[in-house]
Amino acid sequence: MVSKKSRSVVRVNKHKKLRNRLSGTAECPRLAVFRSNNHMYAQIIDDTAQNTLVSASTLQKDVKANLEKTNNVEAAAYLGKVIAEKAIEKGIKDVVFDRGGFIYHGKIQALADAAREAGLNF
């Protein structure tokens, strides 16, 4: 009998393969995205110094106040705009996009497009 791997196991394996190729530096940090069933999280990370430079999520009060729901495409687009604005305030313009093993479609794509429109380059 063929056993099928769960979606979460497949995603984690994809993310591990992606992380072998992607790395954030001080000049071009990594924009890491994670989505759960209820929320989305975005971080801009410098992997050489191993610290998070900027973070945003739909759990934050100022972000959550502007959203009707926290787990739809509109919320993802708003989060992309917020993370880009915070990054530009810190002087970060260029990033490497780490989709976290998720398919580049729907919420992940909306976050990436909104971040690009708000001024991030990747």
Image (cartoon, rainbow, N blue to C red):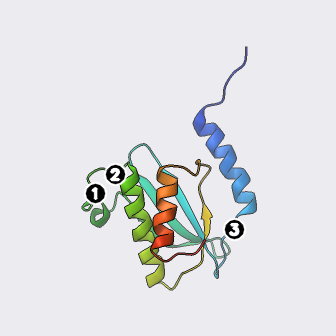
Q: Which residue is mark 3?
A: 23
Q: Which residue is mark 2?
A: 70
Q: Which residue is mark 1?
A: 67
Q: Amino acid at mark 3?
A: Ser
Q: CA distance from mark 3 to mark 1?
A: 32 Å
Q: Tags 2 and 1 in contact by the CB under 8 Å rule?
A: yes
Q: Residues within 10 Å of mark 1 (few under 14, many from 20)?
A: some
Relative depth, front residue between 64 and 73: 73
Q: Amino acid at mark 2?
A: Thr
Quadrant housing residue 49: bottom right
What residue is at 47 percent from the left and 83 percent from the top?
90
Split into 4 quadrants, where in the image is the N terminus? top right
Q: Secondary structure at mark 1?
A: loop
In front: label 3 or label 2: 2
In front: label 3 or label 1: 1
**Residue 66 image point, x, y percent:** 26, 62
Q: Determine which of the numbered discs, if any, sits on residue 28 in the image.
A: none
Q: Amino acid at mark 1?
A: Leu
**Residue 87 image point, x, y percent:** 48, 77
What residue is at 55 percent from the left and 81 percent from the top?
93
**Residue 32 image point, x, y percent:** 56, 62
What residue is at 62 percent from the left and 49 percent from the top?
101
Q: Secondary structure at mark 3?
A: loop
User: Sequence order check: which comes first, mark 3 or mark 1?
Assistant: 3
Q: Tags 3 and 2 in contact by the CB under 8 Å rule?
A: no
63 on left or right of 46 = left
The correct choice, above or below, for 111 with respect to 119 in the image is above
